[in-house]
Amino acid sequence: MRYIRLCIISLLATLPLAVHASPQPLEQIKQSESQLSGRVGMIEMDLASGRTLTAWRADERFPMMSTFKVVLCGAVLARVDAGDEQLERKIHYRQQDLVDYSPVSEKHLADGMTVGELCAAAITMSDNSAANLLLATVGGPAGLTAFLRQIGDNVTRLDRWETELNEALPGDARDTTTPASMAATLRKLLTSQRLSARSQRQLLQWMVDDRVAGPLIRSVLPAGWFIADRTGAGERGARGIVALLGPNNKAERIVVIYLRDTPASMAERNQQIAGIGAALIEHWQR
């Protein structure tokens, strides 16, 4: 009888895990691909060591969309560190310079914006005109691609300006990256000597201040967790996020998630990315 009672107690002790546990990250990604009828690319990387913790289609190409804006502002900050640019420099522009979705820059036609303000608008609000104005300062798409090659990223490429870069044609390598390359590049910008410590803090703070990422990983983030991110959305179901996450308000890992070639709605795409984020968070210590 005592043996039976102990077995029952042991069985009951396992029930909460069976009831409440979410799928392992890779299982969640597979479920997301099935539900989206599309492709998911993802990598989870340790920020300190660069070790890959989880990966799925990490070496496949996906459209960057607006996630490129983090790399763009990293290139701008590299020019600041080199003495070739100043965050306080004012840039003036005209109505014809504005493109679709420019919620911040459209309000400053009369007075212009500083380089720093443009970076803040590009990252925190995904302002497309701000991104184009900054892109011009680094030599356009070719100049940004050259910067990527200089820091050791031989995969990521930018070929067009906003908003054409969001076209996301199947099989088109233009304006694409891989989850692995994007994560490695973000890690270089934030931890290596490619940028000064001051510029690293500034880039990270812009990502912390992101105001348009609410429905994605931020929606499942536990209290006390750190997040800094930049999202992207494109045609043909393209969606993405690059993020830094960690408990105790500390950035511990880089997470990159890209979607492509799905007929799903924006809300459905957001939900699947949030679900992948939730699985990563629940199985953080593994």
Image (spheres, grey):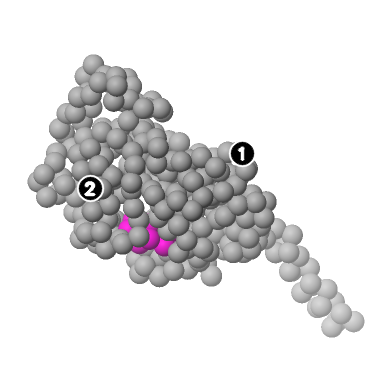
Task: Name the spot of residue 238 as percent of width and height, x first.
Answer: 51, 45
Task: Name the spot of residue 75 as percent of width and height, x first.
Answer: 23, 48
Decide which of 73, 164 is in the foreground and name it: 164
- Tell me: 73 left or right of 8: left
- What is the distance, in whole Å, between disc 1 and disc 2 at their CAs? 34 Å
**What residue is drawn where x is 40% and y is 27%?**
100
* Circle 1 residue: 265
The answer to which image quadrant residue 101 occupies is: top left
Q: Nearer the viewer, mark 1 or mark 2?
A: 2
Q: Is residue 221 above or below residue 188?
A: above
User: Dot 1: within a 10 Å radius of its alpha carbon, few (fewer than 14), some, or many (20 or more) residues?
Assistant: few
Callout 2: helix, strand or loop? helix
* Circle 2 residue: 143
Disc 1 residue type (three-letter): Ser
Residue 128 belongs to magenta span: no
Q: Which image quarter holds the N terminus?
A: bottom right
- Residue lying furthest top: 110
Q: Which residues are magenta?
A: 179-187
